[in-house]
Amino acid sequence: MQREQKITLREMRESGSTRLLVYCRDYKCAHSVVVDASRWSDDVRLSDLEPRFTCQVCGHRGADVVRALAHGHRLARAIGCVKLRGTKRGLTA
Ligand SMILES: [Zn+2]
């Protein structure tokens, strides 16, 4: 699968988002979590972060990272990305 180059965190912050929606690349798992993006610098691209996440549910390396809008998490649930709502487990960089 070819990786697209995504926007930088600066562009994301300029658009008003401060959080990222990260979800497991393993479609059978598809665990997702919203993380605060303040720990990363402005010139980091969302696509740069993707290989750095490891799913704590299934151990899969690599995640999809998109900006989390206020309704972002709900949107992800609507398309079936969140199956483990309410657990303490997540994805870590
Ligand atoms: Zn997973």
Image (cartoon, rainbow, N blue to C red):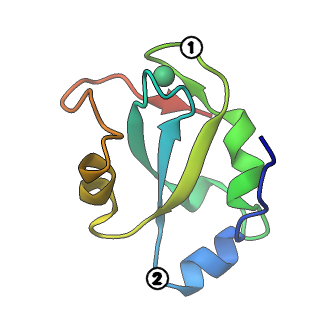
In the foreground, 81 or 45: 81
Q: Residue at x 68, y 58 (%)?
A: 46
- Mark 2 within 8 Å of ligand 1, using the beta carbon: no
Where, quadrant-wise, is the N terminus in this rendering?
Answer: top right
Question: Residue at left 36%, top 40%?
Answer: 81
Question: Furthest residue to the left?
Answer: 86
How many residues crowd mark 2 within 10 Å: few (<14), some (14–19), many (20+)? few
How many numbered discs? 2
State whether label 1 is within 8 Å of ligand 1: yes
Residue 31 in the image, given as x and y percentages of width and height? 40, 30
Which x, y percent locates residue 22? 50, 45
> Is 59 placed left or right of 76 in the picture?
right
- Residue receiving disc 1: 59
Furthest residue in direction front, as rendered:
1
Q: Is residue 31 left or right of residue 51?
A: left
Q: Position of residue 65 (x, y in %)?
A: 58, 51
Q: Of helix, strand and loop, which one carries label 1? A: loop
Query: Marks 2 and 1: which is nearer the front?
Result: 1
Residue type at mark 1 is Gly
Vertical placement of residue 59 versus 29, above or below: above
Q: Answer left or right for 3 relative to 59.
A: right
Examine the rendered structure and indicate whether residue 52 appears above or below residue 38: above
Helix, strand or loop at label 2? It is loop
Asked if the residue under mark 1 is in contact with the one under mark 2, i.e. CB atoms within 8 Å, the reply is no
Disc on res. 39: none
Amino acid at the residue labelled 2: Gly
Question: Can you tell which mark lies on residue 16?
Answer: 2
* Marked residue nearer the N-terminal end (2 or 1): 2
Task: Note whether 83 is above or below 28 in the view shown.
Answer: below
